[in-house]
Amino acid sequence: MTPDSARQLQKLGYDCAIETGAGAAAGFSDATYVEAGVEIVKTSAALWKSVDIVAKVRQPTEVELKRMTKGKTLISFFNPGGNAEGMELARSKGANVIAMEMVPRISRAQKMDALSSMANIAGYRAVIEAGNNFGRFFTGQITAAGKVPPAKVLVVGAGVAGLAAIGTSTSLGAITLAFDVRPEVAEQVESMGAEFVYLDFEEDQADGAATGGYAAVSSPEFRDAQLAKFLELAPEVDIVITTALIPNREAPELWTADMVAAMKPGSVIVDLAAEKGGNCKLTVMDEKIVTENGVTIIGYTDFPSRMASQASTLYATNIRHMVTDLTPDKDGQINHNMEDDVIRGATVTFDKEITFPPPPPKIQAIAAKPKEVVPELTPEEKRAAEVAAFKAATKQQVTLLGTGAAVILLVGMVAPVSFMQHFIVFVLACFVGFQVIWNVAHSLHTPLMAVTNAISSIIILGALMQIGSGSYLVIVLASLSIFMAGINIFGGFLVTRRMLAMFQKS
Amino acid sequence: MEFGFTIAAYVVAAVLFILSLGGLSGQESAKRAVWYGIVSMGLAVFATLVGPGSGLWLLSLLLIAGGGTIGYVVAQRVQMTEMPQLVAAMHSLVGLAAVFVGFNAHIEMGNVLALGHEARESLEGFAALLAHKSPVEQSILRVEVFLGIFIGAVTFTGSVVAYGKLSGKLGSVATKLPGGHMLNAGAAAISAVCLVWYFNTGGILPMALMTLAALFIGYHLIMGIGGADMPVVVSMLNSYSGWAAAAIGFSLGNDLLIVVGALVGSSGAILSYIMCKAMNRSFVSVILGGFGGTTGPQMAVEGEQIAIDADGVATALEEADSVVIIPGYGMAVAQAQQNVAELTRRLRAKGKVVRFAIHPVAGRLPGHMNVLLAEAKVPYDIVMEMDEINDDFPETDVAIVIGSNDIVNPAAQDDPNSPIAGMPVLECWKAKQVFVSKRGQGTGYSGIENPLFFKDNTRMFYGDAKASLDQLLTLIQ
């Protein structure tokens, strides 16, 4: 919890409390919390006792879990896959536990996806650590003292951490290459300014969307092609950042010992998968080592702690969003809605029952459907299509003209000459009208309607011709017509002029 | 001699009329083109006054002047948002005038035919024209008069109803009397019977019956068509008023009437066609009312509508480089065009690229949005048509939807079962961020759920469009 998120939580109707000195490492003193209206509690035991919702970062210890009572809610990382005793304990105590790592990867839940927040930090920090241990500039420079080539960075795995690393590295000016087993992320990689490394390998890749947005295990042939490509790249690159993780498995070995051997002295490898055995087998967890040929391998796993302030802010925001979703009425009362996909997915114990693992989310993670491939037409086919279209158009036009001519001829057979003269005028006028109106700008359609309105009052001519008649009824009707047409003529033209005068060029 | 002069004047007037319509191809040439129209109308009236058949000069001029005054006052006072109503009202006047002129022709015909041979020789003008007609020509004349009155009457009541709906005096919901289209078909059948009857007898009774039937058709047809289809209705009535003038022109043997009627008729027909195409619906289905039948269940919309306040919109606008604004009928209703224009000016002053995307059926009249924006002094060269701007959305930072709904509905492309499937729409959801200014969470006129509102990059900016923009303007200086 940060002072900012505490204020937000208070808006939801909650009172906030924090253990004394909890924010010190992240640069938030007790005083700033007091200022934000947070109660400071002296010991953690007292804190656990006094509150209804406990939010913490690390997996709770047995002692801590024993402090839970029925109806209390714990929001924390929990590692439910490898913490059966913890779950059982929480269940027996009747506590409702929400495991932050279980937040489903759907777009609605991104705001509370703490794993992504932490991965983001890890990706950024990985580049910074690498730079710290790398003896040259990232960006290429031409100085009075000579030319400096840019650093070449390879990022393996373009998940959240990988993308963050790509972004950081490109913005520092390095040439960045990136690889991922899911070819559909190539677009994202390129949008971050990196170059995607394509393999010369043909295989239908499993759609990442089917596995909840995570990478799946790849086939041996694919792996071979991938390793060959990496070996080819190894002498060229200065910094390698590996982020490849597959859920609930040991990290795949992607950067073999002979690749390390092929790298230039002074190169740096940052292995973000160190916790799960490392993408490089030489990696030592939580340590920095230097190989015989002078390559530094960094296996730290505590990147978020190395950026405590940033990590706290992001995690606090994730927690706050989670609490917001738990409090739909903003009344300070928890509404643990097990129908909600996100809340259901993250909950591991609820109401004295273990609810792990969750059912698959109803909504598919990534909606990127494979694009339907439109076969490229050969020039001959295009030509044939054009000819066919032309023929069809000609046929249509000829049929239309033929029918029209036949109808006119038929009318001409019966109708007297005087009618036919007018009829020709009519047909030609329609023709001219169609030709002219198609050229009218779309933006001028309203003025067009107003002006056609005005000129359709040409009917006034008919009334003017009739008003000289002897019959009074005719005179009255004709007068009315003239009057109405008069309104229309003046109104139509004037309003058109008014409208057109408004159209100004910038 | 006089007659020759009239014909010559008519030729000049016809050419000028064509030029005045042709000039509407561009904003600048249009300003000149209106004068062609005015001059040719003056010329036509003058030539007719001095030509054969007319009399009572003074009365005619007085009537024109009287009508002209009213027209002048109306044209000066009308709000640009009220243009659809005004156009509809004017159509009704043309329709009614056509009915009167048609009846006059009928009365004259009766009078002339009753006269003896010698008396006929002494007649002048229109009556003389009638007098010299052979029996076949008289039959044709009857059909022409009949058609002129029929179309005129349909135009009249149709336009009156359209006026009522557009001005809000009648509910814009499609309503039909019990019996639906059978009533229309029945009235049309009565008219057809009357035509045969009148053709054979020339009596006033079938004529009056037909007029009543036509008036009913006009009323009932337009009552059955709802709000968003009004652009088609108005352009269709525009077309009818032209055909009515042409039919009267036939019966009076006046070529200028025929030419102008045909010009107006085809203009309205093309407008209707463009509107229908923009909604991907056939003309018949619009006229018969209601949206086309759905072929299956619509795609369920997933996700939630996320609201945003003016602060958020202002921040996003400050950061954006390119902005596209999509106005709709809601902007006209809220009278928000001045605020939109002010926002545009301020954003442009900050060096941002601001453009407008206009869907062909936005508003209640073809080109309605263009006129409203022009009135608010938005330069017309940043107002784009759908085809011009649709490809630019992926490079757009912010798209703002103000009071439009169906024209930005992605279901038209994604959901083959949607009632508007296949309708061309503005692909604003491809922009990096979309803000939708909307009153509330309702589904709008057509009752179709809009998946745009649920997209990840969409934020809903609830409230009256004008009030929302006012609030926004205080934040963007």
Image (cartoon, coloured by chain):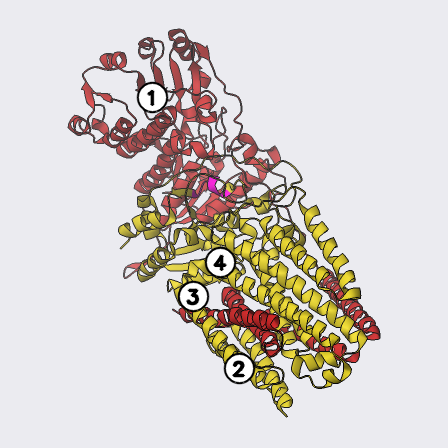
Chain colours: A red, B yellow
Q: Badge 3 local density, few (<14 within 10 Å), some, or many (20+)?
A: some
Of labels 3 and 2, the one closer to you: 2
Q: Amino acid at mark 4?
A: Gln
Task: For marks 2 and 1, give the CA distance.
Answer: 100 Å
Dot 3 or dot 4, earlier in sequence: 3
Pointer 2 and pointer 1: residues touching (CB < 8 Å)? no
**Secondary structure found at label 2:** helix
Q: Could you tell me which quadrant the C terminus of chain B lies in?
A: bottom left
Of labels 3 and 1, the one closer to you: 3
Query: Residue B30 at x, y = what percent?
Result: 49, 74
Which residue in the protein does label 2 denote?
B57
Pointer 4 and pointer 1: residues touching (CB < 8 Å)? no
**Secondary structure found at label 3:** helix
Does residue B93 belong to the magenta stretch?
no
Task: For marks 3 and 2, give the CA distance.
Answer: 26 Å
Of labels 3 and 4, the one closer to you: 3
**Secondary structure found at label 4:** helix
Q: Which residues are magenta?
A: B452-458
Query: Residue B434 at x, y = what percent?
Result: 43, 47
- Name, please, the residue furthest toward the top: A92
Which residue in the protein does label 3 denote?
B74
**Residue B352's image quarter?**
bottom left
- In this rendering, the answer to whether A393 lies above or below A247 is below
The total of numbered circles placed on residues is: 4
State whether discs 2 and 1 lie on one chain: no
Of labels 4 and 1, the one closer to you: 4
- Name, please, the residue furthest toward the right: A413
Which residue in the protein does label 1 denote?
A58
